[in-house]
Amino acid sequence: MTYRSAEYYKHITDSIQYYAKPTYEKTVDEIINQISKNPSQKKNPAVNAQWNASVNFNIRKPNFVVLHHTAQNSAEQTLFTFSISRTQTSAHYVVGRDGVVHQMLNDFVRAWHAGNSKWGNVTDMNSCSLGIEIDNNGSEPFSDAQIKALIKLLDYLKDEYGIPQANFIAHSDVAPSRKSDPSKYFPWKRLADAGFGYWYDTYNLQTPPSDFNALLALRVIGYDISSQSSAIKAFKLHYIQNEVSGTLTDYDKKVLYSLYRKF
């Protein structure tokens, strides 16, 4: 068995699962205990009246999907990475190069995939999103099998949780100064054509009006514009792909204007 090969990581991960699955169940039990407490048991010092229960509630659900590439050499290596505590990182799903989809967490729990992130006014993307890792090292095209499997998965998630089309986004979108995944090779237009995320009107790009504010448009779409250069780079990584810099060309502005009008 070759060290750090897919077979090596599969063997280790299978062994780790003996401990990982009970740890998962213990954490789930702790979450159940936390959410099962009624308000009178929380002892909020600001509440000075008796508890009156409402009957109109249910569990919160995910409203975004954040897509990543694994930056590793095999799905087996990623499954190993997410099975050990020292990495402090996880995702709900891992999509292999061969189209095999692994689910690692319940959709309703908070995975640790987005890190320090911001999209629109949301400053904790982990709390409202599903994280999907796609097996890819970041410097190669994505396989047709895994994109087909990904679209099938996204179709289910969109229907199951009512996730808006605009809310299928990249890790690089929500963490523009830190991350570049799922890389310039990711087929965003193919996903948009399937109803996941938006794409611009390729054959009908219009020149923006003279008073068009590009930074405001980026902000409306969702980008954190506190670093103008980082926001532009993230936008171009997603929508331009073949040239990623911190400035907008006239063509880039046309693309941005086309997208801005969809929001």
Image (tube, rainbow, N blue to C red):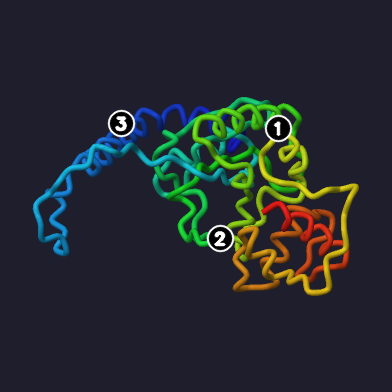
Residue 174 occupies quadrant: bottom right
Q: Are marks 1 and 3 in contact (CB under 8 Å)?
A: no
Residue 32 occupies quadrant: top left
Query: Residue, x 61% and y 59% (percent of image)?
Result: 222
Image quarter (top left, top right, bottom left or bottom right) of the N terminus: top right
Which label is found at residue 22? Answer: 3
Q: Amino acid at mark 2?
A: Gly
> Quick check: 97 left or right of 102?
right
Which label is found at residue 206? Answer: none
User: Nearer the observer, disc 3 or disc 2?
Assistant: 2
Query: Residue, x 61% and y 25% (percent of image)?
Result: 100
Distance from disc 1 to disc 3, alpha carbons, whole Å, reads 32 Å
> Quick check: 199 left or right of 165?
right
The foreground one among 213 and 142 is: 213
Residue 8 occupies quadrant: top right
Going from N to C along the chain, the mark reached first, 1 or 3, is 3
**Residue topped by disc 2:** 120
Query: Is residue 91 among what the camera can see?
Result: yes
Label 1 sits on a secondary structure element that is helix
Query: Residue, x 33% and y 37% (percent of image)?
Result: 58
Going from N to C along the chain, the mark reached first, 2 or 1, is 2
Query: Is residue 1 among what the camera can see?
Result: no
- Binning the other alpha carbons within 10 Å of mark 2 as few (below 14), some (14 to 19) or many (20 upward) gives some
**Residue topped by disc 1:** 147
Label 2 sits on a secondary structure element that is loop
Q: Amino acid at mark 1?
A: Ile
User: Nearer the observer, disc 2 or disc 1?
Assistant: 2
Q: Measured from the top left, where is residue 78 in percent x and y? A: 55, 39
Q: Are marks 2 and 1 in contact (CB under 8 Å)?
A: no
